[in-house]
Amino acid sequence: MKNVIGVINLGKPHSMLDDLTRNRSIASVPFGGRYRLIDFTLSNMANTGISKVAVFTLNKSRSLMDHLGSGKEWQLDRKIGGLFVLPPAIEFPTQEYKGDLQNFHGHIDYFNRSKEEYVIVCRSHMICNVNYAEALQFHIDSEADITMLYNRVDPDTVDLSNCYQVEVDEHQRVRGMSSDFDTGNVYMETFIINKSLLVELIEQCAENEQYDLTESLLIQNINNVSVHAFQHQGHLSIINCTTSYYNQSMRLLDPEVWKGLFFQPGLVYTKIKDEPPTKYIETADVRNSLIANGCIVQGQVENSILFRGVKVAKGAVIRNSIIMQECEIGADAVVENMILDKEVCIKRGQSLIGNATEPVVINKRSTI
Amino acid sequence: MQRKEIIAMLLAGGEGRRLGALTQKLAKPAVPFGGKYRIIDFTLSNCSNSGIDTVGVLTQYQPLILNSYLGIGTSWDLDRANGGVTVLPPYVQQKGGNWYKGTANAIFQNMFYIERYNPQYVLVISGDHIYKMDYDKMLDEHKKRGAEATIALIEVPWQEASRFGVMNVDGADRITEFEEKPKNPKTNLASMGIYIFNWDVLKSYLVRDDENPYSSNDFGKDIIPRMLQEERDLYAHRFQGYWKDVGTIESLWEANMDLLEAYPTLNLHDNEWRIYSVNPNQPPQYIAPYASVKQSLVNEGCMVFGNVDHSVLFYGVHVGEKSMIKDSIIMPNVRIGQNVKIYKTIIAEGTVIGDNCTIGVEGEHAPITLIGEDSFIPANAKIKN
């Protein structure tokens, strides 16, 4: 895959996860017991063999930068290619940020200087395990200018608000794309494009002062260039609000989803923490849960997800909850229908019971 | 090459014959331990946590798995431009070559490696012990006393003392006497096989030892007795804490079971002294609705549908419904079918066990059953040691 550049576009502002994105970008929201959302896209690229990846960032990037490091977890600490983090190239404070495409335009040299022929552009809130090689082959074989990835989803299990859906004809050509459609074909915010065309379209949009990548670069050009659609068959989780974050997390408790998302076709890589295996004490009672390494469990855990290094004391009960890294649940405490951000400490005997349909988020490092 | 104050020489060539099927394809230091680690992780992590950034790893027996596991030392933060991990197998020189004849000979044959760093001190350790130790404290003591060699000692139960090299010390902890595996030990201070030497002193002894055709070229049998005989300044560094030689199936099993205590002496959940290893990058473990896991260590990538009691599960282990695992060690990627019963058994990597099998013998004094790597046990089988 030396002919492809991976681009992860985080330049579109959204604050869809409220408390969970108060101090971090959506890309670095913790997910699935040990990952950050961006791990899935990065791992897909790594498993496809892409060794040159650009991450276009916007703001609140401290935790993201800390997580990415040199990119070695995704084999991106390379002499040839490697990881490029590209924050907005705007004049502060005189210039205003107008959209993700402005960010692409500001770094147009990155594309101009690259020899690669193709670019895969992704975002980070659509969680799937995919090898892009097949989609790229489809793109080349069908002589498309742009190939969009889409997934057929069941609207009952996935919240489709804020999503674009595509209309695809029998030749797999995209005939239309809108957030108002109801075709069941969800655009995965991932497309493959020939680099020369990408540069041309970025310049064109900038001239017309259009700065939204999906609206200006894709939707406006559906009838001008040949846009094809490639269907991804595997599991897709769309994270677009706190409720969907919670629901999509809970779907991981289905062993088929667990296997599909974490193993097929490749593994998901994340920053290593060197935690020991999880320890279950005599009094532990764990059912239908996902438990990451480094935990010490003495209490009861049911239908829940424990991130790395969580401590559950004797007599504590955790139900239907997501407990992030390094949280401590005191003896005899009860936590139900909650999302605890990192390093939250629940004192002995406390009871936190949230709403089953709208889980409550407890902010990072709180003590209750 | 920039000069180093201290470098470590890690002896990792041991065959570990008493570990039977576990060491058929790997050297003893590469044997899996504690649900996640290989034995050598403990000494490598000790080096890293003690601020030692140059480690020569002496390999000889079945080095492939060990070599590829070590890589360039990244997992232990030992991928350094100057120093880091260097694998040192025996090699052929102009005058011919030899296998490593003994622990001292292995160091002797790699004097060129040591000289490149021109160190003041050399730490000699072996890759088949489980313990956490700050070598920097030992070095401080060595320097303060102006010692020529310092040997780490641990008090062992009197009845076990005859299995070790034991030492007599005077009031200032100066070593006065050393006996290798004595029938009637005079002391219960056992050598842990951890030595710090002044390099110039060690070098002269290694050269003389090599010239002696009757020497077995071993630290415990030759170098240390000779230094004592010549009244060199040998001191003891007393160690308190967990230390175990996991050279036999029994001791390997025991050391794993020790970790299952509510408050084990060897605490793996210690952020101040992490044990590093190569991480398999697997998702969090899944514990099913009707599963039960108690008094156990379970690593990532496991799927548990059955009962796990007082056992250690490495990564990627699959335990089927209504199966029961007790007092056992299940190594990576073992798949256990439904309705299987496993008692006091060590199952090596990659083994597949069919439905309705019974493996091992129940009971506190029952013998340990061992199933080798990549075995296939068909359904309904009954296997015991």
Image (cartoon, coloured by chain):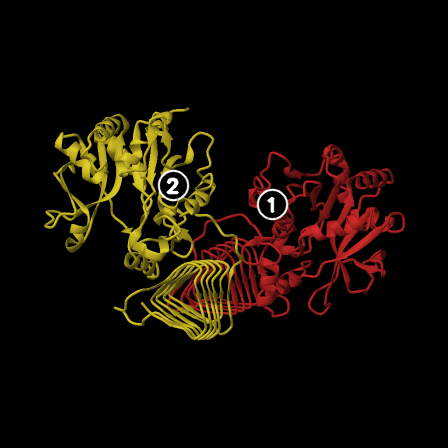
Chain colours: A red, B yellow
Q: Nearer the viewer, residue B158 or A304?
A: B158
The type of residue carrying mark 1 is Leu
Query: What is the x, y in percent for residue A360?
Result: 60, 63
Q: Chain of mark 2?
A: B
Query: What is the x, y in percent for residue B56?
Result: 37, 35
Q: Secondary structure at mark 2?
A: helix
The mark found on residue B337 in the picture is none
Residue at left 64%, top 66%? A358
Q: Image quarter for residue B19?
A: bottom left
Q: Is residue B40 above or below residue B202?
A: below
Q: Image quarter for residue B14?
A: top left
Query: What is the x, y in percent for residue A55?
Result: 67, 42
Tell me the mark number nearer the camera, choosing from 1 and 2: 2
Tell how many labels: 2
Does residue B304 appear in this view?
A: yes
In the picture, measured across the screen, residue B193 lies left or right of residue A147, that is left
Does residue B110 appear in this view?
A: no
In the picture, measured across the screen, residue A13 lies left or right of residue A215, that is left
Q: Is residue A70 above or below residue B188?
A: above
Which residue is farthest front?
B96
Q: Which residue is the site of mark 2?
A: B49
Q: Which residue is the site of mark 1?
A: A64
Residue at left 27%, top 40%? B194
